[in-house]
Image (cartoon, rainbow, N blue to C red):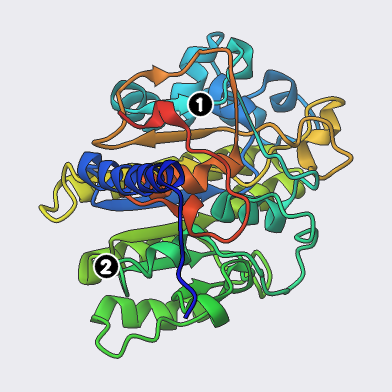
Amino acid sequence: MRHLFIEKPEMKKLILFIGCLVLTATSFSQSAKTKNLIIVTLDGMRWQEVFRGADSVLIHSKYTEDREEVQKKYWSASATERRKMLFPFLWSTIAEQGQLYGNRDAGNKVEVSNPYRFSYPGYNELFTGFPDKRMNTNDAIQNPNMNVLEYLNKQDGFKGKVIAFSSWERFPQILNTSRSGLPVYSGYADLKNKDANARLTYLNELQHSVPHYLGDSTRLDFITYQFSKEYLKQYKPRVLYIAFDETDDMAHAGNYKFYLDRAKQQDGYIKNLWEMLQADPFYKDSTTLLITCDHGRGDEPMDKWKDHGAAVKGAENTWFTVIGPDTPGKGEVKTQTIVYHKQLAQTISQLLGFDFKSHAGHEVGDAISTVLK
């Protein structure tokens, strides 16, 4: 029988290495106050409106109907006031208690690192921490990369407590439900829980009755939000992902008024959700909320605000916000640095006390240290 022999110096190094791994894992679990996590994405929402509010040039362009009404609702000479008018929750509660990243005017940059700058590659990067160049389509291909939601769903205390609701139909492939086993309710998929309460059962029926304004593959964000909220009330998931879509749809349609309206509506949904969480003993003071997007949009020339993609300058520029018990209340972060969406997957796992990077089986960006205490 062959015996494994390790020299003493090498043995000491091995013991030290293993000790460091144990200490790192222990420090994650002991330091994290976050017990639950809510992730919300606003598809294709530009950083410009998040940090500057409504765009004067676009308001007075061919892309805006009812300009007087839009000006009344969203215009002020001050960018600080304009952004509060558009995103009142972000610029009150989160600005006071959380953090906001991505104001390029202040030198704080957030970007996608994938070169494609559209939805599937963006969501792949966000959840796998890996800008995989194979993920270069919006087609219904199964994602071969492990994602952080899948990883969390395998951890003790989280099994069966991770769920996603999305307006766009593509998330079962992005999160690879056939491999991950995650419950992902996208497009017009019905909730399958046999013990679902009366309101959830009614939402299954309602979503098929409302007009399909966004086509037959994307349901209204209102329905996605209602499903998420009611599921939260009944089942108390530990991790909930909500993917809104209408900001991207309205931008592609070239309707700036509706783009702004949908952004403000989604801010209202998030406000209502956060207040509900803080009123529930299960979630109060133990839940982190992270809000971001999948890609940016163009800016110059003006017409490019509708578009994104590899050839669109500025479509890599994004933003994110976070609020929760492990995140210092710094408000708008003006440090002149750059962070990438590939770093958010590990950030998410560390907020919950885990180390996705060591278990993913592929490249994962480092966590954003300033998000955690």
Residue 344 x/y as whole percent: 51, 43
Q: Which residue is nearer to you in this view: 259 or 16?
A: 16
Q: How far from the left and from the top, in percent, is residue 367? A: 48, 38
- 21 vs 265, left or right, is left
Residue 101 is marked as 1
Instruction: Tell which of 152 and 61 is nearer to you.
Output: 152
The span from disc 1 to disc 2 (Cα, nearest Å) is: 32 Å
Secondary element under disc 1, as helix, strand or loop, is: strand
Q: Quadrant of the C terminus?
A: top left
Identify residue type, mark 2: Asp
Task: Report whether 213 appears left or right of 4.
Answer: right
> Please, is residue 130 above or below residue 220 in the view?
above
Q: Secondary structure at mark 2?
A: loop
Q: Relative to 111, does residue 135 appear above or below in the rendering? A: below
- State the image quarter where residue 108 is shown: top right
The 10 Å Cα crowd at callout 1, few under 14, some 14 to 19, many 20 or more, is many
The earlier-in-sequence mark between 1 and 2 is 1
Query: Residue at left 69%, top 26%?
Result: 59
Given residues 113 and 268, the one toward you in this image is 113
- Identify the amino acid type marked 1: Tyr
Q: Is residue 96 above or below residue 243?
A: above
Question: How many marks on residues?
Answer: 2
Compared with residue 20, is residue 246 higher up or lower down, i.e. above or below?
Answer: below
* Residue 366 visible somewhere in the drawing: yes
Evaluate whether residue 218 shows in this view: no
In this picture, residue 67 sits left or right of residue 232: right
Residue at the image position 78 percent from the left and 27 percent from the top: 299
Disc assigned to residue 52: none
Residue that carries the numbered disc 2 in the rendered image:
156
